[in-house]
Image (cartoon, helix red, strand yellow):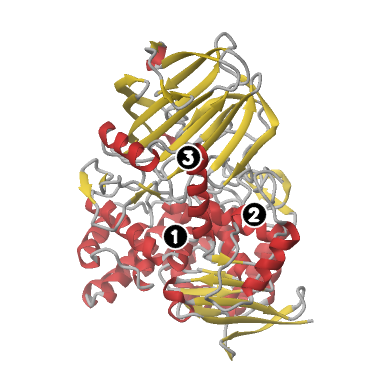
Amino acid sequence: MRGTSIRGALHALVLSLLLSAPATARVADPVDLVDPFVGTSGDHGQLTPAATGPYGMVQLSPDTRPAEHAGYDFTATQLTGFSHTRAVGVGCGGAGGDLHVAVGYAGEGAVWAMDKASERAAPGWYRVRYGHGVEAQLAALGAAGVSQFDMPRAGTVRVVFDPRHGYTRQRSAEWTAREAGDLRGKISAGTVCDAGLYHLSFAATLTLNEQPVTVAPTRLDGDRLAFDLPVTAGDRVTVRTGLSVVDPVSARRVLDTVVGGRRLDQIRAAARAAWAKELARVQVPGDDERARLIYTHLFRVMQTPVRIDDVDGRYRRSDGSLHQAPKGRHRYAGWAIWDNYRTQLPLLGLLDPDRSSDIAASLAELYLAGKAPWATETEPFITVRTEHAGVALLDFRRKGIDGFDAAAILPLMIAELKDLPRKTPDEQIETAYDTWAAAELARDLGQIGIANRLRAEALAYRDMWRRVFDQVSDDFDVVKARGLYQGTLWQYRWAPVFDLDWLVSEGLGKERFSVELTRFFGDGLFNMTNQPDIHAPFLYAVTGEAEPTARLVDQILHRPMDHGYTNGGKRTAPWHGRAFALDPIGYADGMDDDAGGMAAWYVWASLGLYPLSPGQPRYALTTPSFDRARLVLPAGRTVRIERRGPANGRLVAVRWNGRPLGGLFIDHAVLVRGGRLEFVLAP
């Protein structure tokens, strides 16, 4: 498998022993099990094998021809160079591709054949040979990266820096310093789907065999700068880069502080160590396909949002204003909240509450800056959309993750409600969810009058739900029917997760709810390739039925299945294959990872947990994929997850610290105290 250094049976034995050892024992790194090539082929994840650190601004990635969505396609065999930013697995044509660097022998053109057999990647690192034997290695950590090129023969090498390269519209680019030892500038480019603009500054240095380059650059068209360097066989060209949301001077400070004169192997080692620390928050045994998949997906979960405060703590908000992060705290950007508030943000809240406190503070600052539903014209980094930030904030706060002044943010959340869309059935449900979140936050703050008013407004959606969703109609299986967003009435029927008790007891009634949910899956009406109904397999927890969820989740996680929908319509014939696979075709056709949204679904389901209703801090339970797993939480607390009985058995009981739970849910507050969660299976 690409991108791994596997210890084989010894690694599996050591990790197995460590999982059964006391909580204080050290656990072997899972970092070698990550495959960054998963999801990088065609429209099967929209991912790249970029070198990047946890939550790092730099995604140092190869740019291929054809580029597909995110500048790279695993099946492509031609290379145009390397660039420093990406949006992680999002839709449209992706975004990023900033500060493109191309290194090749003069006269050979600007596109090179890739030696695909040489291509390797691991967390924080990438390597490939191209052209007539040039070997490129990339390493990145945080807001900085190193690109290293080893030259196989003597000649003249041309190094071209292109500040206008990207995968959305480029509004502007400006060089503020043009010497090889001090390259600085700033760019403005369209965010995902060209909805809004983000503004970045960069700084770079160019060396030959670690010596300063003194030749002057040639100015090419499109603001590109070219350096022509005479080389001999074995010479090494190195580009070191730093990014900043503040200005080019600050970008240079980032470069000097994070990278300085460090070699690529040193940055690679530091990135590996950072990834090992983050991935060790989840521990599963072995190195088989399931272990590789859970760590590969956890790797994607931990790439967004990105930290944007500089080494001196300065950063910009979404309105472009300059601020200083409190000492010891950080700020984040790069939002795709509609896509990942259901799964990815709750997973970070469970595994990394300290970082989530800073993420919550950053979400709150969206409101302070005048929150827009999509990207503004003054974003500090690539952003998609911010809908349901209020739900995420409520969810964080109810899990003890505050990091923000809820009393100050609540009026801004309430003010936003009047501008939320209500034309279509899905918009009415989603706006009701946001209104419910504001009502619940008001109740938590003791503002009962406001809470009651908002709750009544939120639950008014029920009349519409009865008119539209109660009885199956001729257009129930039509994508975008009645103006729906990328889904069907069948799929949006289950969307009011904030009001499930009513949906089960009154909306449909318990018996009918179960029967029609089973029909939904049995008739192939479920869509795993987009977010609106990805929670549906776990809805049986509300009715206390364990077996249907267990069967569905096992199918989705591990076996080929029919996928009948695209974002624009229903397929004439389903695409048949794995929803999640250890392969460059890593997701079902047309399924985006969506900033860790789908990757987090895989992690949750593999562990036997799912955040069914963000804002209501509890988890639905189902049979986990592993006989045992461990969650490493702060303050030395751990959660041991154990599956007892035959692997293909039916779930008959769930116990917490030896006592029956009495249902298929566990509260967040109970889980994070630490303990043993047992799933008991019978033949």
Image: 373 above or below 116 = below
Q: Earlier in the sequence, mark 1 or mark 2?
A: 2
- Say which amino acid is labelled 2: Leu
Distance of mark 2 from mark 3, alpha carbons? 20 Å
Say which quarter of the image contains residue 109.
top right
The answer to whether any part of residue 431 appears in the image is yes
Can I make out residue 476 in this image? no
Q: Residue at (51%, 73%) from the top-left corner?
A: 619
Q: CA distance from mark 1 to mark 2?
A: 23 Å
Element on which disc 1 rests: helix
| Marks 2 and 3 close (CB-CB < 8 Å) | no
Which residue does the image show at 69% across and 73% down from the upper left? 627
- Could you say which disc has been placed on residue 33 in the image? 2
Q: Amino acid at mark 1?
A: Leu
Q: Left or right: where does residue 448 sit relative to residue 623?
A: left
Q: Amino acid at mark 3?
A: Gln
Labels 1, 2: front one: 2
Percent position (x, y) of residue 121? 61, 41
Residue of label 1 = 345
Q: Position of residue 410 (x, y in %)?
A: 24, 64
Location of mark 3 (residue): 59
